Amino acid sequence: MAALFSKAPNTISEGQFAKELLTFVAGLEEARKAFPRTKEEIISISTLERIYDKERAAAEMYRRAEKFLVANYPARYTIEKLRETVSRKLHPERICEGSALLFLNNDMRAISLFRLFVNSFAFRVGQSMGKEAFAAILRERFADQDLVNLYISKGYISWEDINLLLKDVPQGEKLVHIQDRFSRLISFLMNLSRERVQDARTQLLIEDVYKTLKREYIFLDDFPVVLSIFADQNILRDERVGMLSKTQLTERSRMQTRKVEETLVELEHEKDVLQDTLKQLETSQEKLKALDYAKSQFIEVVSHQFRTPLSTIRWTSEMLKDEFGKTIPDRGKGFLENISFKSRFLINILNDIFDVLQLEGGNLQLQRKPAQLWELIADQIEDMKDEAESHKASIVFDKSGDPLKEVLVDHQMIRRVLEILIRNAINYGPAESGQVTVKMGIENKEDKNYVWVEIADKGIGIIPEDLPKIFTKFFRAQNAVHKVADGAGLGLYLVRSIIELHGGHVAVYSKPDQGSSFRFYIPIAA
């Protein structure tokens, strides 16, 4: 890290780095031949009005060329060599934002992202209070006055300010030091926002700032590292898996693979201990209750111990296919696809088991926040597009109809419900060219208004005798077992339980060989 915080050359004008990066890409002969419209694309990018649009487009064009060169000319090009060349020629440390972030080292990029997020979030909080009032509160109530004075003097924290804050900090402690100072400022701003607009709105503000920056820096694999400045691990918890870059994920997969055998030995020992315990608890009703508890604990331990290595194995197999798919024989691709499919299946089973344990143990507390339900649906559909395509199916979201009111729901749990129902529709739909349809609307039932969401398929359907049983834990209809042999029969049980926790209910309409429609209702708060 010796060169990380050294004095950098003078900063360059906005958009200049993107322009120089495009010139560099245009000079890569092999990439230019592979993408003959490169010149026209560069001209088109130069006409974009917003600086961040230019930066993002330039970075994405570079990433495309980089991916092609590394895949097709591995002896000549590597990711590291290409980025070192760009860094040496273009000096990304001159600007430390936009497309330049792609070529900074990990620590410098992380600090740059911290700075960008803090500036954006502070601006949004201050905007609601007025510049003078906001500055007065910062001076009066925030302990780190050096940081406050730098921010107030310009209305933002610059890269030069970062160097000033770190000039007396030992070299190996700089990243941790600035992360800690920014973390305390973020916590202060969050509390200040909560005083004015309550917790739910503050959470939405954080998510909006995060998503806006993520769109601008979509070309960074490790963008979620910015979340490390939040002390609360529950903030944007679904995004935290992205805090590891592909390189880090690959390295972690190697480490986890080495630990799998050790974990299996530990689990075998735990199983033996639990089995001995179970034998001692079979003599009375009180012991049977303890036996049930021990079983649950064992399943929870297994779920926890296996989910992390399975996730790593899954992502590693998918990355191997993406990075080396052109050079791997068809048989090898089949092995990778099988690893990915089976690990994803096991992860889903473990997630179901873990959620059931949380529900039945009374430990699942809903984190209700205001939401436009259609946004949650759209995000979930986007996340499951690849899964649908692997089954030769498509997901259609019918958003026609009247605008819907905001509802108060646990975002993660509702997305869990959508995931289960959409996955079932994909799995039990037609074998070829299946279509899953998602609709939503408003309905008044017994003088109470509900938002409803319907997921429909044209697959195998459900026989009338099985309809009363499908929400029972561990139940699977015979035609479902024939269609998809693997499964635990927990998904629909979880769906009904989660929706009922929200004060709603689930309905199903189905006929054999004509498909199924599952509709859940969530009350609209008055």
Image: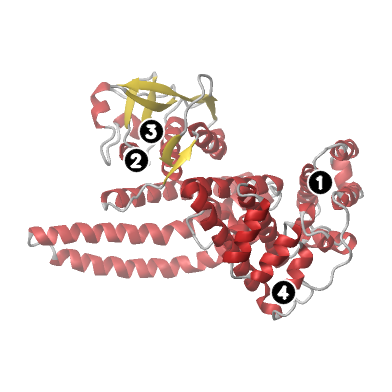
Whichever of callouts 3 and 1 sits on the residue coming sooner in the sequence is 1
The residue beneath circle 1 is 58
Residue type at mark 4? Leu
Q: Kindly give the residue lying farthest to the left in the view shown.
A: 284
For the residues labelled 4 and 2, the Cα–Cα distance comes to: 48 Å
For the question of whether residue 222 can be seen, the reply is no
The residue beneath circle 4 is 166
Label 2 crowd (10 A; few <14 / some 14-19 / many >=20): many
For the residues labelled 1 and 2, the Cα–Cα distance comes to: 44 Å
Element at label 3: loop
* Location of residue 481 in the rendering, given as x and y in whole percent from the top left corner: 34, 34
Element at label 4: loop
Quadrant housing the N terminus: bottom right
The residue beneath circle 2 is 498
Residue type at mark 2? Ile
For the residues labelled 3 and 1, the Cα–Cα distance comes to: 46 Å
Q: Nearer the viewer, residue 70 or 38?
A: 38
Element at label 1: helix
The residue beneath circle 3 is 525
Residue type at mark 3? Ala
Whichever of callouts 4 and 2 sits on the residue coming sooner in the sequence is 4
* Location of residue 505 in the rendering, given as x and y in whole percent from the top left corner: 31, 31
